[in-house]
Amino acid sequence: MVPMRSCIACRSRESSKDLLHLVVNEGQVIPDPDHKLGGRGAWLHPKCFGIAQQRRSFSRAFKSAEDLSTEKLEAFLKEVNLRSKQ
Ligand SMILES: [Zn+2]
C-alpha cells in the first residue's frame, strides 16, 4: 500500500510517489525527492507549481506568515523538465 497524500495546490489526493515532497528551511522551500530531510513536509504535483505560487499554497502549507522563497524548488523543477525532454 502506498500512502495517500494531498497536493497543497490542487488538493487532490494522490499516492505519495506521484507527488514531490517539500520541506522548508530558513524561509526557502526545498525539494526533497528522496525524503532525506526531516521536519514538517508538504506534497505537491510538479505540474501544480504555478497554481501553488498563485494561491500562496506554500505559506499556507507550512503555516508561515511570510512569503517563502521558491527559488530552489523552481530550479529543481526546471532541471527535471529538461531531463524528461532528453
Ligand atoms: Zn496538484
Image (tube, rainbow, N blue to C red):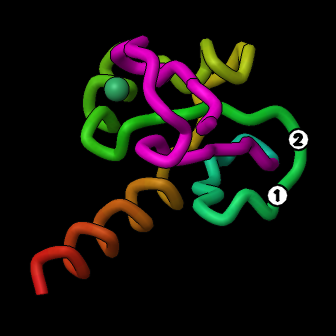
Q: List x then y, in percent, for residue 43.
A: 56, 33
Which structural element holds mark 1?
Answer: loop
Q: Is residue 29 above or below residue 35?
A: above
Q: Is residue 76 above or below residue 15?
A: below
Question: In screen coordinates, is 86 left or right of 19?
Answer: left
- Looking at this view, name the residue that lies furthest to the left: 85
Q: List x then y, in percent, for residue 12.
A: 38, 14
Which quadrant of the structure image shows residue 3? top right
Question: In screen coordinates, is 43 left or right of 47?
Answer: right
Which quadrant of the structure image shows residue 69? top right
Q: Provide the residue span drawn in magenta.
A: 1-25
Q: Which residue is mark 1?
A: 37
Tags 2 and 1 touching, CB below 8 Å: yes
Q: Residue at x 73, y 35 (%)?
A: 41
Q: Quadrant of the C terminus?
A: bottom left
> Does the magenta portion include 76?
no
Q: Residue at x 44, y 27 (%)?
A: 14
Q: Quadrant of ligand 1?
A: top left
Q: Which residue is mark 2?
A: 39
> Does the magenta portion include 23?
yes
Between residue 1 and residue 63, name the one nearer to us. 1
Does any atom of ligand 1 lie closer than 8 Å to the CB of label 2? no
Q: Residue at x 73, y 57 (%)?
A: 35
